[in-house]
Amino acid sequence: MYRNEQKRRKLDEEFEQLIMDERTRLLQLRSPWIMEDISDHIRGWFAEFYAATGNFHPYPDPVKNGTVLVVIDETMDVGAFQESLTKKPLTSEEKKKIKDKKKAEKRKMKEKLKNQKMKDAKRRKKLKDAGIIDVAYSIASSKPIGIIEDTMKQFSIDWRNVDEYLNKNHGPIKAWVTEQELDVIHHELRELVDEYMRVEYELLKTALAADQDEPYKPGKVKNKKKKKGRKKKKVIDPTGDRTLSSLYHELKDASVIEEVSHRDFNEFIADFNFVADDTRDEDYLTTVGPAKGDIKMVVQESMLGMSEFDIAKPKSILLVGPVNSGKKLLCNIIASELDAVFINLSPEKVCNFSQDMDMFLHIVMKVAREFQPTILYIEEAHRVFHKKIPPEEKDILPTLLAPYIQKKILKPIKKSDKIVLLGTTSLPWMAKPLLKRNFQKILLIPKCDYGTCFLLWLDLMTENAPEALENYAYSALAKIMKAYNSGDLANSVANTLSVSRKMRLKAEALDPMEFLEYFLTEMDPPLFPPEDKLMDKFNKWFGASNKFEKMRNAAMAAKMAKQKKK
């Protein structure tokens, strides 16, 4: 990852150097011709109006982009200008009346739209109360989706005729740089020529007024207002005298930055919930929640903002679920898929920097910002917000990071930063409510269903012994062991199908009881599936932190109250 970042920096420097060189070349060779072309165009515009009307069109102000209006043909034509010369100027009262009329029309239109929206909302409510779905009502498309579609269209246009196979060193495309710099230079030179031509325009107007024996007073030039930005406080960088390389290696040597093995989303084997709608009754009392495949899809969508697409993303995500349910695997997959720097901020790592947490977090965030995309990881995040610290955890000072998360980690992350705080927890109820407030998106990893369990057995078994176990009784295994967590099943397969057992497969068929023996005899104490009480505890905690679950409960309560009244 570090080598990739160094290579990226080198390519960026070469790109910046090419832009500077190309800009210098274009300024030397093309700027005199560009300025002459712009001047000739504006003088031709003067001559056109003088020949037709005997006068000159008002010179566009810089606030309206100057003579760019002439290029895009947004000035008055000769006929309209001739009419404006013969028309009497409006009095201040007439101007005020026109202004008030426009305001009244605008207000009336706003009121009309508001009333229309209210009518539509009332109509939809009546239909909803009657149990009718309004299929004519269409939801507006998502803004991020629109950005992605526009980006993809532009990408297909830009790269249509570019063959990257010949560009082995990933060098910049010079034709694009030339085109972009020409556009920038043209705009800069037009502003400069506008100033000179305004002087020429004023001389022409003065000469015309002298010929007609009329007084002439130059009008005020309306320039673009400069935005008054707030004076930013100078931030003193305590590590300003150190290189990024030294900061990176300091965290690497302390094992805070970890190497992540290559994993992809295909390794998180999961199926979608296809029966939720079939099991939902009229009173919404029985609703099957999402399956692991649905959670996997939500995680993938949440990570879109960590890519090149400039779309909204959560600053922090918490994965909740029983031990061995695949939380850590998902975190590794995310880091691997993004090729992100993986910074571990778990209590075991952070406690070594308890003497100067401000400096430690400053280095972490500086490295995270410079080597984006970055994953900030907290394992078993409930420990950071413990209600009561267990005696065995007192040595690692688990709550040391808690006061710094909002101010030092989440607040400095900007919308454009490709940084996310990723946490896991298997005991969320042991943490204070502050845990929920520090994570914007909380996802509960559900227990395995039949579909996920079947796919898991099929993939793990055929991967270990593809020929001997091609037609095994996977359906039966999935039905019997679907209550176990996916990590437990993976461990069972890995332990049972050892090298020696694989060698005996053709002579001695694999008995399904061998997988159960791993859980019941080889594990001490025996490993059983998570109890329903435990999953209910997860669902209860998650329901209290999920706004949609709260809305559903409120709707159910309102419906039950209505039925009681009847």
Image (cartoon, rainbow, N blue to C red):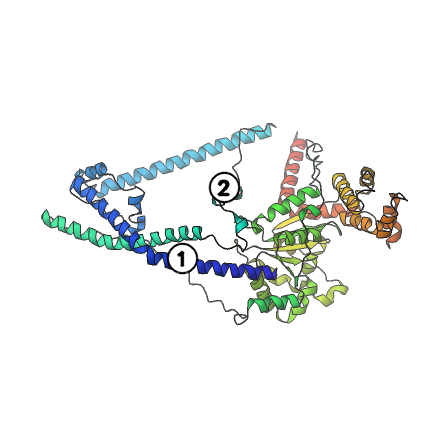
On the question of residue 218 being in view, the answer is no
| The label number, if any, that marks residue 413 in the structure image | none
Q: Is residue 238 left or right of residue 296?
A: left
Residue at image coords 45%, 61%: 17
Tell me the quarter of the image containing the N terminus: bottom right
Q: What residue is disc 1 on?
A: 22
Residue at image coords 72%, 61%: 388
| Residue 22 locus on image (x, y percent) | 40, 57
Instruction: From this view, report whether residue 311 is shown above or below residue 25.
Output: above
Q: CA distance from mark 1 to mark 2?
A: 28 Å
Q: Is residue 314 left or right of residue 518?
A: left
In the rendered image, the residue lying farthest to the right is: 508
Tell me the quarter of the image containing the C terminus: top right
Instruction: From this view, report whether residue 206 is shown above or below residue 551.
Output: below
Instruction: From this view, report whether residue 15 is shown above or below residue 118.
Output: below
Amino acid on which disc 1 is placed? Glu
Circle nearer the N terminus (1, 2): 1
| Residue 512 locus on image (x, y percent) | 86, 43
Q: Nearer the viewer, residue 506 or 373?
A: 506
User: Dot 2, crowdedness within 10 Å: few (<14), some or many (≥20)?
Assistant: few
Residue at image coords 39%, 53%: 181
Amino acid on which disc 2 is placed? Lys
User: Dot 1, crowdedness within 10 Å: few (<14), some or many (≥20)?
Assistant: some
| Residue 475 locus on image (x, y percent) | 80, 37
Q: What residue is disc 2 on?
A: 153
Q: Nearer the viewer, residue 206 or 227?
A: 206
